[in-house]
Image: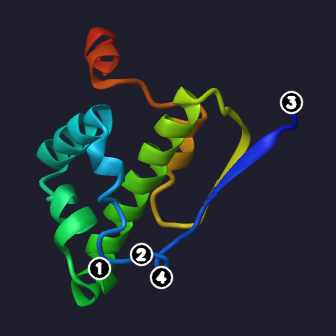
């Protein structure tokens, strides 16, 4: 199988409703709720209900795009597509770290005392 790289675009690529289809997946929905609760950012609103003006704000675009990268990585991994490399173009490289397996589920972090 050929090697693939995941490249996640940065601010400016966001669009209203961009996460609607992703949030039909129960695992992604649960992750969205956990991330929203932990960060205090209403990701569900940003991914489904925010308009273009609201999404243009950096404080909204950055967490929404990072979550999209993480969610897409999870879905691709579930289908057996593993990246040989990940590139991200936004302030927080969380999606890249998650895609490369450097972030652990919250339950594992708590068990290890993170």
Q: Which mark is residue 55?
A: 1
Which residue is found at the position 35% from the left and 24% from the top?
105
- Circle nearer the N terminus (3, 4): 3
Give the spatial CA distance, label 1 vs label 3. 37 Å
> Does dot 2 land on a helix, a strand or a loop?
loop
Q: Earlier in the sequence, mark 1 or mark 3?
A: 3
The answer to which of 52 and 109 lies nearer the viewer is 52
Q: What is the CA distance from the residue labelled 3 to the residue labelled 4?
A: 33 Å
Residue drawn at x 34%, y 72% is 61
Asked whether the residues under the numbered discs 2 and 4 touch, taking CB atoms below 8 Å apart as contact, a structural biologist would say yes
Q: Quadrant of residue 113?
A: top left
Tell me how the rendering is colored.
rainbow
Q: Nearer the viewer, mark 1 or mark 3?
A: 3
Numbered disc 3: secondary structure = loop
Q: Residue furthest bottom?
A: 53
* Residue 62 screen position, x and y as percent: 37, 67
The correct choice, above or below, for 12 with respect to 17 in the image is: below
Q: Which mark is residue 12?
A: 4
Give the residue number, with chain letter if any, for mark 3.
Answer: 1
- Residue 14's disc is 2
Residue 71 falls left or right of residue 100: left
- Gap in angstroms between the C-alphas marked 4 and 1: 9 Å
Cβ–Cβ under 8 Å for marks 2 and 1: yes
């Amino acid at each position: 199988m050929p090697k693939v790289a995941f490249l996640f675009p940065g601010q400016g690529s966001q669009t209203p409703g961009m996460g609607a289809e992703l949030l039909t997946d129960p695992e992604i929905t649960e992750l969205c709720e956990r991330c929203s609760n932990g960060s205090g950012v209403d990701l569900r609103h940003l991914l489904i209900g925010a308009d273009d003006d609201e999404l243009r704000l950096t404080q909204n675009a950055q967490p929404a795009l990072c979550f999209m990268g993480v969610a897409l990585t999870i879905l691709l991994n579930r289908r057996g597509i593993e990246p040989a490399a990940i590139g991200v173009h936004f302030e927080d490289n969380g999606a890249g770290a998650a895609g490369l397996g450097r972030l652990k589920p919250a339950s594992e972090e708590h068990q290890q005392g993170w």
